[in-house]
Image (cartoon, helix red, strand yellow):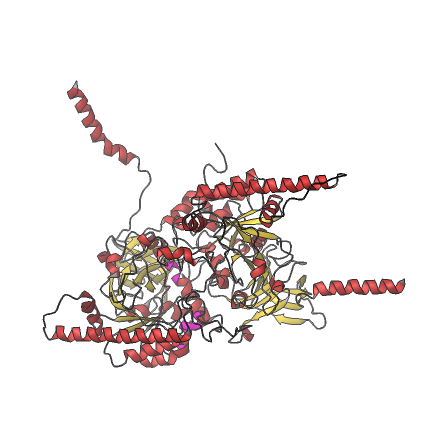
Amino acid sequence: MNRILKTLYTSMLALLPVAAMAQIDGEFVKPRTGKFLLQNATVVTVTKGTLTNTSVLVENGKIVQVGTNLSAAGAEVIDCTGRFIYPGMIDSGTRLGLVEISSVPETVDYAEIGNVTPNMQALTTVNPNSEAIGVTRVSGVTTVLTVPTGGLFPGTAALINLNGYTPDQMYGGFKAVVMNFPSSGRRGRFDRRSDEDVKKDSEKALKEANEIWGNASKYLNLKKSGAELQFYPEMDQLSKAVSGELPLLIVVNTASDIQHAIKWVEGKNIKVIFSGVAEGWRVADEIAKAGIPVITGPVQDLPTRQSDRYDTPYANAGKMAKAGVKVALRTDEEENVRNLPFHAAFAAAYGLGKEDALKAITINPAEIFGIADQYGSVEAGKRANLVISTGDPLETKSQILHVFIDGYMIPMSNRHIRLYQEFLERSPGLKAN
Amino acid sequence: MKKLNLILAALLGLGLNYSNAQTQKGNVLIINATVLTVTKGNLENTDVLVQNGIIRQVGKNLSAPAGVETIDASGKYLMPGIIDAHSHVALDVVNEASSPITSEVRMKDVVNPFEIGIYRALAGGVTISHAMHGSANVVGGQNATLKHRWGVKDPSDIIMQDAPRTIKFALGENPTRVHGRGNGIQPKSRMGVEAVLRNGFNEALQYKKGWETYNAAKSQKGNTKTPPAYNERLQTLADILDGKIIIHCHSYRADEIYMLINVAKDFGITKLVFQHTNEGFKVAPEIAQYTMGASVFADWWAYKMEVYYSTAFNAAILQRNGAITSINSDSAELIRHLYHEAAKTQRYGGLTDEEALAMITINPAKQLGIDDKVGSIEVGKQADLVIFEGHPLSSYTIPQMTFVDGVKYFDIKADPDDQRQFVSATEMVEPIFLHAYENHQCLQDVDEYFEAFQGAFIEEKH
């Protein structure tokens, strides 16, 4: 009897996984790779003009060919008649993947304790399964710089592609040490310091920054001379910016701070990118003269001063570009990085122009990050980061139909879309039990 | 006698003139525009004549009466002034966070007509905003509906005096955090929120009954009854029960939305609008059936726990289920491009131009009880109008001129660098605020409750 029961239990246990499987209904669509022919589209290459009735062949994660009459042999054909192909959009400043819910501290991972923590790595913190990543990429934003924040040297930013199961699979080949340049601006209404105190604090912070930078230079020299060094991860990471091995991403916003930052950079043989640059339009000529590339945004933002024209943040990118500054855009967002194309549209309308606005979220950041051989345009040999849309992706009315990241065709779904599918027509509707 | 009549008439006339002259009313003829009426379709190459602040004629080949300025809007779009059903613009304070019910306070008492945010809103085509109490309390203060008459000095002149009364309610995380966790009193949970509401309304019923009994006795001979003590808080709740005030309730989760619908049903309340309503899509049929709809963000989500399970398709789902739906700002930044926020309903849910535009014009007008006066371009309505270069739902559009009561308060061609009306002597010369920190938010003035969280909420207070 016992034996029979045992056999029965065993057979029931064996059936369990099957039973569990049976409870899963519906198909989960994964990103998939392969050979794809995106046929007969209007291709907005960004770097080589706009090509009509043109096809794009994607294989092994790369754009293999851009042209007409391409062979479809062995390829999955996606008819793009009447459709547009754009390069994947790049947001040059976000906290995507570093935070899930801003008000829940347990999910906020973009800031560490301490003023000098350049060794904090955004890349290792990126959560590849963040809901915000799925929500972002269907908008055509395929690549973002994700940036830690907090103290003076809060960490190291990393470029990520919005597909992959691990941070390493997502890594886009660019990192930069972040510096929050000592600010003479106010942190908000609650910041009630006197003007003198604000000035004093910023001077003190700059002095401190110089000391720290000096220490990192010493550390670098000692390291170069082969000295035996104590384990000092902060200095080790910062010295990479001092040596130029990693670029320094200087977050700076007010006009006087930008001027100070330009002066601060002078004579240091380092790679510098400015980020934020909210008041760049006030000192655009000086930035252009210094030859420092700029990541600016958010575009949809308030003016920094009460007395400013209402449209200064919209017009900022255009004014800097006109002065000769190389401009890329950022949203400085986490969950709403998907709005990058709309920020670009506002910059376009208020002076940057459509063509340059598109460049500011494609080829310009690729060039600023030194990865233009891989990113930023629809050209043979580049990574297959592509957007197929019904029209200009900067227009809200356009629909994004397909997104490719590293040659992976991304399922056009995320929680926002699934909730739409579930709740558009509820059943039961109003009926109460 | 004749003389007396004349004097009386003159006096009456003066009285009328006085009330009319309280705020400026304009005359203007806008010609050759593509007129997006919102309620009566789109009219190509059409003229709109405004006299004394009212739309008098909509048609072709209208001619300007003597002295009326003509504005050529060839190739441009004319739409009704944008209405923001959730804003904290022009308010000196937002929260009276001293009790779970503060129905006695009025935002009308803290209106600041000098706030630059009004001008910035005008530059985005917004002519009316619903300046609301914050979300610290279950029953907050009474809101003010503002007309953006930039330049007036008397606070009462930017208040839309012919708008009905509205009041702020709030459910969920904010009131439970401020009162339950902050002050150790009910509500600490969503159960407590419901209890605060039901207890409040029941107390108001008692209060009402006390007055009814007194008033009935008053007409009796030999009555010696003393009146009940007047209580502004309870009187306001009684006014809600009497349908004199529209509730605008800050809410996020479907469960709490459903709860308030049931409370409203039990107390016979029908004038109810949900604000934010991020999970409104889950109870869209109920919202459509029993309420005056929902006023939502276009795409905000994930900034706090109760908005994590949101969808940018919320507005589209609500609309398709028949709920009156509007898109609001709750932000000094978003209020400047509500036309763009409304356009996002086309990306997320494919709404038509007319549906999208209604979400920032006639729909919020309905929710504020002012749709008979504003919210569309129709003869007889107040002349709140905006001219756009490019279709207002295009990402590349630029607002050109904004009119309130036919008076032009924004003109991109005459936009001086410094638009401030009033610079306080004590204000710092160049206060530089970085990155949208100036946003008006629902939990403004209750920062102390966030210190325990190391300021993690400073930016996230909706």
Q: A426 and B250: which one is in front? A: B250
Residue depicted at 40% across the width and 68% down the height: B434
Quadrant of image for the N terminus of chain B = bottom right
First to last magenta residue range: A313-340
Q: Is residue B257 visible?
A: yes
**Residue at the outermost right position:** B1
Q: Is residue B301 left or right of residue A217?
A: right
Residue depicted at 40% across the width and 46% down the height: A419
Quarter residue B47 falls in: bottom right
Q: B16 and B374: which one is in front? A: B16
Q: Is residue A271 magenta?
A: no
Q: Is residue B341 left or right of residue A216?
A: right
The relative height of residue A252 versus residue B196 in the rendered view (above or below) is below
Q: B314 and A385: which one is in front? A: B314
Residue B227 in percent (x, y) is at 67, 44
Residue A363 in percent (x, y) is at 32, 68
Residue B188 in percent (x, y) is at 42, 45
Residue B121 in percent (x, y) is at 52, 65
Q: A156 and A59: which one is in front? A: A156
The relative height of residue B320 versus residue A158 in the rendered view (above or below) is above
The relative height of residue B453 versus residue B225 in the rendered view (above or below) is below
